Image (cartoon, helix red, strand yellow):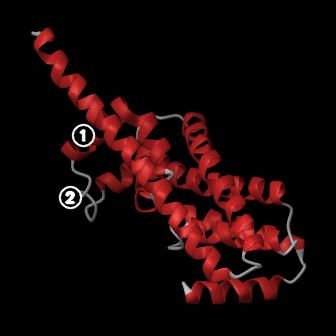
Amino acid sequence: MEAFASYLTEISALIGSNTFFAYTIVFAILTLCGIGLPVPEDFVLILAGYFIFNEVADMYLMIAVAMVGILLGDYLIFLFGSRWGDWFQNHRHFKKAFSQKRVEKVHDYFDKYGNKFVFFARFFWGLRAATFFLAGTHTMSGMRFLLLDFLGALISIPLIIYLSVLLFQKFSGEIETAMMLIGEFSHVLLAVMISIVVYTLLKHYLDGKLTKPLDK
């Protein structure tokens, strides 16, 4: 936390009052996050909020820039799965991980829960890239993927940026305190999403169990 707070201060000092660089750095890092850069998106969104707090960027424009960067990065992963998913599945180094049985199971899962899976993956940093790649290997269209991803991003991105700005204002730019509270909020949001996912899966499972005797 302290290290990130230090980086945040250094980046902000480096950017100074250059509005163009503020938007560019947020857009670039969020796009790279989508294709594998091991940096949590929340940190970049906090950085965006810090730029807004320092009046280097406009809130609404920064939210739009962040949304586009995130959607572009996610779509590149989806496109990668769409174009080269078969190559990965058939390559000798990856064939064991992408066995025919496993691939069919994943496709069946996407047939049943694809929309929900892509939507909720936006809230899980560790699952995001793998889910979007698998969505690309499936028959899901690019427009459908972007719509689902956009709806998920529309909930989390503005919330985190807006909350960051509010907390920086409340604590007079005290980075560590603001970050700690934003981290707690992110955990609450994640817990809510996990609860919804568990409830949805459990409901599908119980509905299936209850309808089986009727099918016979």
Q: Is residue 25 visible?
A: no
Distance in Å between CA atoms under marks 1 and 2: 14 Å
Callout 1 amino acid: Lys
Structural crowding at the residue carrying mark 1, measured as other residues with C-alpha within 10 Å and reported as few (<14), some (14–19) or many (≥20): few
Left or right: 165 in relation to 214:
right
* Percent position of residue 88, x then y: 36, 56
* Percent position of residue 101, x then y: 19, 43
**Foreground pick, 161 / 142:** 161
**Foreground pick, 77 / 154:** 154
Q: Find the residue positioned furthest to the front.
A: 170
Residue at the image position 40 percent from the left and 56 percent from the top? 130
Residue at the image position 22 percent from the left and 46 percent from the top? 102
Residue at the image position 72 percent from the left and 87 percent from the top? 9
Secondary structure under badge 2? loop
Secondary structure under badge 1? helix
* Percent position of residue 22, x then y: 81, 72
* Percent position of residue 85, x then y: 40, 50
Above or below: residue 42 compared with residue 146: below
Residue 16, image quadrant: bottom right
Image quarter in which the N terminus is found: bottom right
Above or below: residue 19 compared with residue 85: below
Given this view, does label 1 or label 2 mark the residue nearer the observer? 1
Residue 13, image quadrant: bottom right
Q: How many numbered discs?
A: 2
Structural crowding at the residue carrying mark 2, measured as other residues with C-alpha within 10 Å and reported as few (<14), some (14–19) or many (≥20): few
Left or right: 198 in relation to 79:
left
Residue at the image position 24 percent from the left and 40 percent from the top? 105
Callout 2 amino acid: Lys
Query: Which residue is under mark 2?
Result: 96
Mark number for residue 105? 1
- Does label 1 or label 2 sit earlier along the sequence? 2
